[in-house]
Image (cartoon, rainbow, N blue to C red):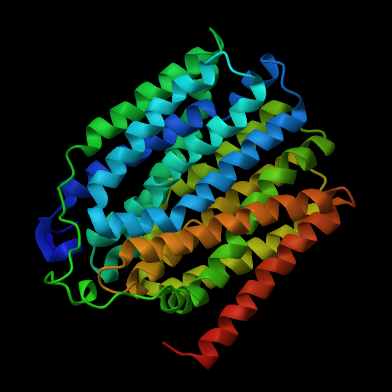
Amino acid sequence: MARSDTHLPGGTQTGLDARTLWTLLTGNALTAIGIGFFLPILPLFITARGGAPFLVGVVFAAGVVGRAAVQYPAGWLADRVGRRPLLLGSLLVYAAVFPLYLLPVPVAALAGIRFVHSVAGGAFVPAAMALAADLTPESSRGRVFSQLRASDMVGLLLGPALGGFVAGFRLEYVFGAGAVICLAAALVLVGLPSTAPAQPGGTVEADLVPVRTARLLRMVLPVLVLGAPVTWTFGAYDSVWSLYLTSRGASTLVVGLSFATYALPIVLFAGLAAGLSDRLGHLWAGRLTLATHGLLAATYPFIASVPFLVFIGVAEGGLTAAGMPALTAEISRRAPAGAQGRTQGMYQLGLNTAQVAGALVSGALYGVGAVAAFGSVAAVCLLGLAANLVISWLRPT
């Protein structure tokens, strides 16, 4: 990426270049590996401590609630104190929480620990998104957010495999290794430039005129109705995909591979997909992604071949690789000056809430049947697409 001057919170003008971007991407990839390192092992750890399967669900639900709850406050804080302090603080606290899982506390206390852990980790996201927007001119943000998502997918590809290898020696080692990886990510991100917090009377006009939450919501809504159905789909597949594949005869190995192979084209083709989204337009890239998710979800219940299901999943990962980064780029474009973090936080809050709803609703509907579960995903996707088109028609931008 060519060097460009951008204004960060507080009106500080900095010459940010490709080195800063790659520092962010490397730190984000390490963070994703640290998270992916222990999460697949956590259910095994809980049950080894005597926890029932119901408690496993409670612990993971606490994590989702914590991550969702912190998005908007963390975005606000990133606008106030700067991106770098929040990124580093989030990682340091996240690393510090890992040893708490090993304390001799009642197993039910793991739900509270997981909540705190997710609050710390969730604060990283809006600050990273806001910094990525700071680094990039509007015309190139699709590419940068695709690279950021690809670095997330590195965690999905490498984290569980490495974590499983370490857990083969002893489950507890996973938590120590996860802490070390997140500390390494923090060490990488120390290389990010410092930014001054926004101050009343600063040089940016937005510092003088507070941006109301209702105004941010109006700006975010046309994009959120596209992004939320996508994360609804992710939540639904987290809940039912493994069950559906095994009902078709897939082994647990194949189930795990299906998640990894979905991520693979996102990592490999991030640059190509991003370039297409920047040319096509971010909203249209999001619309095509949502239509793809919806149409494929409608076909899954009628496919019995496990290899074909996995193959379509790989194709789905490739065909939709540009969608979410493009929508994040669109959100960054709509953010008022001085409120990039708050805007990203509000958007991420909506995405996380939709993911929880998708997991709960689709999980319940799967008890009725696969057609009901996957059909609801298709319906939500198509309703979101229709809502965006109506809003765009009523309020063209």
Q: Residue at x 32, y 55 (%)?
A: 77
Residue 308: where, in percent of width, then height?
Answer: 72, 45
In this view, the residue farthest toward the top is 169
Residue 114: where, in percent of width, then height?
Answer: 55, 33
Report whether residue 212 is seen: yes
Above or below for 149 versus 98 = below
Q: Nearer the viewer, residue 332 or 79?
A: 79
Q: Is residue 7 left or right of residue 351?
A: left
Name the quarter where the N terminus is drawn: bottom left
Report whether residue 302 is seen: no
In this view, the residue farthest toward the bottom is 394
Above or below for 342 versus 263 = below
Q: Residue at x 22, y 58 (%)?
A: 135
Residue 18: where, in percent of width, then height?
Answer: 18, 50
Q: Is residue 77 left or right of residue 238?
A: left
Q: Nearer the viewer, residue 153 or 392?
A: 392
Q: Is residue 326 left or right of residue 2?
A: right
Q: Is residue 259 left or right of residue 276?
A: right
Query: How many numbered discs, if any?
Result: 0
Name the quarter where the C terminus is drawn: bottom left
Residue 29: where, in percent of width, then height?
Answer: 37, 38
Q: Residue at x 40, y 62 (%)?
A: 344
Q: Nearer the viewer, residue 252 or 205?
A: 205
Above or below for 267 versus 13 = above
